[in-house]
Image (cartoon, grey):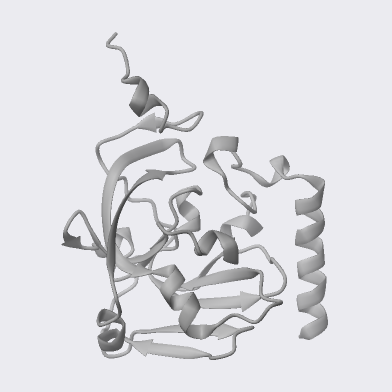
Amino acid sequence: MSRVDPAVAQRVPPGQTLTAKWPVLTYGLTPRFDPTRWTFRCFGLVEREMTWTWEEFRRLPRVTVRSDIHCVTRWSKLDNEWEGVPARFIIEQVRPRPEAKWVMQHADPDYTTNTSLDDLRDDDVLLALKHNGRDLEPDHGGPVRLVLPKLYFWKSAKWLRAFEFLDVNPPGFWEQNGYHMHADPWKEERYSDQETRAMQQMRAEAARKLRDRS
């Protein structure tokens, strides 16, 4: 058996296997993209709610970053080149209110996943339009998906359509179906039964507050 390059091994979290391919994992059908109807919206606890059309979004400032993918299904794909709009730029435009600590990602068709606002502010977090120099394929989340490299890849929502800024941290789709609230691959935060007591309390508190508001 050939030895694994130690520099590469240090980039692969526990329980992961390297792949050169990019497996397609989707719950349900791939949504159809209509550029005349597509928008990206930011709402909730922000000073300025904003919505961009597809043409407006394409004109936003872009950067290129290189990062690794770690999927909760135990594969990792290294050295992906992404081009897209920095999440930090979007956040700066809408100016979250001081009490906003969490963001719910909303994606087509009805997908959600929760993330902390601090995680979205990292320099390598993008609303990606291209992968390795090519437009992002629909099966991989095109036209726009989030790329948040330091968490398992279900936290990088395909077909992204909105950020909702919140003062609570409610679980999204997979978090309601047994997955971890945070999803750090280096800690193998895969499933809800691995959550700390504080995280379990956060789930319950968020659910209570949202019920009270409705």
Q: In terms of image quadrants, where is residue 167?
A: bottom right
Q: Is residue 197 above or below residue 58?
A: above
Q: Looking at the rendering, in which quadrant would you find the C terminus?
A: bottom right
Q: Position of residue 81 (x, y in %)?
A: 25, 52
Looking at the image, which is closer to me, 167 or 200? 167
**Observer able to see residue 148:** yes
Give the total number of marks visible in the rendering.
0
Q: Is residue 81 above or below residue 55?
A: above
**Residue occupying the far top of the picture:** 1
The residue located at (53%, 90%) in the rendering is 49
Q: Position of residue 72 (x, y in %)?
A: 49, 42
Looking at the image, which is closer to me, 44 or 74? 44
Residue 64 located left or right of residue 10: left
Residue 46 located left or right of residue 22: right
The residue located at (64%, 83%) in the rendering is 45
Q: Looking at the rendering, in which quadrant would you find the N terminus?
A: top left
Q: In terms of image quadrants, where is residue 12?
A: top left
The residue located at (28%, 43%) in the rendering is 79
Q: Position of residue 184 (x, y in %)?
A: 57, 44
